[in-house]
Image (spheres, helix red, strand yellow):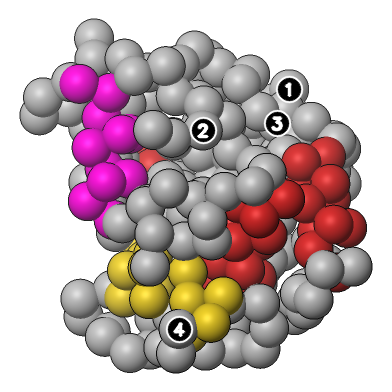
Amino acid sequence: YMDRYEVTKALWDEVYNWAITNGYSFDNAGSGKATNHPAHTVNWYDVVKWCNARSQKEGRPAAYTVNGAVYKGGRSNDVVQASAAGYRLPTSDEWEYAARGGAVSRRFPWGDSDEIQHARANYDSSSSYSYDTSPTRGCHPVYNDEVYPYSSPVGSFTANGHGLYDMTGNMWEWCFDWHPSYEGSSRVIRGGSWYGYADICRVGVRFFNGPDYAN
């Protein structure tokens, strides 16, 4: 199972506020353009701890532990998945399976085309890519209000074949794995973002950032 939507600022705040009164600590409090926009400016450590807090808040087992204890504070690269019953990040492969929505050999989450336009996703359109056929160029004209970030409310575009939204564009999404080319130093991020071009919005692309990175 996977959440249909990117984590909204409202949901992030609800869990975060519970967490800091129940023994959790974070590097970043998180931001969001509005309550129904995706949460952002959180690093990998923040997100993994937030997953544990959401689990415990709902009476589920925490997915992540460090040396046998529920992971609640600090920056640890010894995090292991101890339970599949709590909230957790997808692995990179799980993310790609989910993003494809059942489509085979497609460039994007929609199964009827290998082209991308602003009608389908919130991204930065450029004529540099033959498969970017959007009639509008640059950042999405609906969400470009000259106040960063140019995010869109979650679920603003059509879901993919698995009923999942925003698997392309809007906000980068953390995965659990180390990037295979940067084992021990960078975790996988996927999906592109509102400022990403069409090439990094492809479902097959694995990008990376250090787990302490929050932008």
- Pick whichever of labels 4 and 1 is earlier in the sequence: 4
Q: Position of residue 26 (x, y in %)?
A: 75, 76
Q: Nearer the viewer, mark 3 or mark 1?
A: 3
Q: Which residue is mark 3?
A: 152
State whether the magenta stretch is mostly helix, strand or loop: helix
| Residue type for callout 1 | Val
Residue bearing mark 1: 142
**Could you tell me residue 199's position as x and y percent?**
33, 46
Disc 2: CA contacts within 10 A as few (<14), some (14-19) or many (>=20):
few
Q: Are circles 3 and 1 on residues that touch, CB within 8 Å?
A: yes
**x, y percentage for residue 9?**
79, 44
Magenta part of the chain: 92-102
Judge whether residue 97 is colored magenta. yes
Q: Which numbered disc, 3 or 1, marks the residue that appears first in the sequence? A: 1
In the rendered view, does 110 fall on the left or right side of 213? left
Q: Earlier in the sequence, mark 3 or mark 2?
A: 2
Position of the C terminus by quadrant? bottom right
On screen, 48 above or below 128? Answer: below
Q: Is residue 129 among the parts visible in the rendering? A: no
Sooner in the amino-acid sequence: mark 3 or mark 4: 4
Q: Which residue is mark 2?
A: 3
